[in-house]
Image: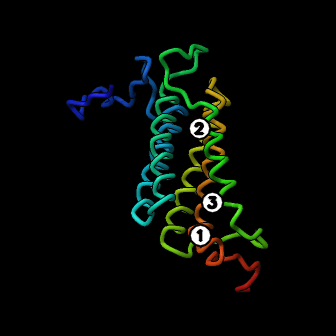
Amino acid sequence: MVRLNKIYTKTGDFGETGLSDGSRAAKYSARITAIGAVDETNSAIGVARLDADGDYDAMLARIQNDLFDLGADLSMPEDGKTEDRLRIVPIQVERLEREIDAMNARLEPLKSFVLPGGAALAAHLHLARAIARRAERAIVELASKEAVNVPAVHYANRLSDHLFVMARAANNDGMGDVLWVPGKNR
């Protein structure tokens, strides 16, 4: 159970922050950069939820909770031990895949790249997708330097796909997509 009585602790005043295992990391480290990018993604999804309802809101709520799981996963350096540690697990990745497939089944195949925009929800989801891709890049960079739970990397990769497909679905099942026209303004 998480319990926060005091928000500021002053323990980070010298450029380090605490990890879940009690160790300290520089606030500019690859691990903290990845955790921060996951937090940014979660915040952008929170903004998107302002325009979401029904199934979209429920999916986004689950994703927001998963993103806290992902942050917790990243805040605990990988040492091979999994007991009593919150880790992203394959079933979370598989849920994203099922939701992507269900939403994508209603969409026509793309004939051009999609510009971020259309309905407000779609525009917010495209922004969240771009931030999710930054989080994925940060997690992959961390994984190139330190061991990272593999399903965490998979989850980050599927999340940007999920947000892209949901943005298309939110654009009247793709009918309201704003398509790129190469060289249109030359």
Q: Of the residues under marks 1 and 2, which one precedes in the sequence?
A: 2
- Cα distance in 3D space between marks 1 and 2: 26 Å
On screen, 181 above or below 80?
below
Helix, strand or loop at label 3? It is helix
The quadrant holding residue 21 is top left
Task: Pinpoint residue 38: horizontal percent, then vertical percent.
Answer: 50, 43
Residue underneath mark 3: 164
Q: Amino acid at mark 1?
A: Pro
Which mark is drawn over residue 116? Answer: 1
Residue carrying label 2 = 92
Q: Position of residue 83 (x, y in %)?
A: 52, 14
Residue situated in front as seen by the camera: 25 or 173: 173
Are discs 3 and 1 less than 8 Å apart at CB? no
Place of residue 63 in the rendered image (x, y in percent of width and height, measured from the top left): 50, 46
Give the crowd class for mark 3: few <14, some 14-19, many >=20 residues within 10 Å: many
Q: Residue at x 62, y 60 (%)?
A: 164
For the point 24% across and 33% down, the residue is 8
Which dot, 3 or 1, sits closer to the camera?
3
CA distance for labels 3 and 1 = 9 Å
Identify whether 152 is placed above or below 11.
below
Measuring from the top left, give residue 13's x and y in whole percent.
30, 31
The image quadrant where one finds the N terminus is top left
State the CA–CA distance, disc 3 to disc 2: 18 Å
Three-letter amino acid code at the position of disc 3: Phe
Which residue of the protein is positioned furthest toward the left in this rendering? 5
Q: Earlier in the sequence, mark 3 or mark 2?
A: 2
Closest to the observer, 27 or 94: 94
Picture mark count = 3
Under mark 2, the amino acid is Gln
Against 94, residue 169 (above or below) is: below
Q: Is residue 171 left or right of residue 61?
A: right
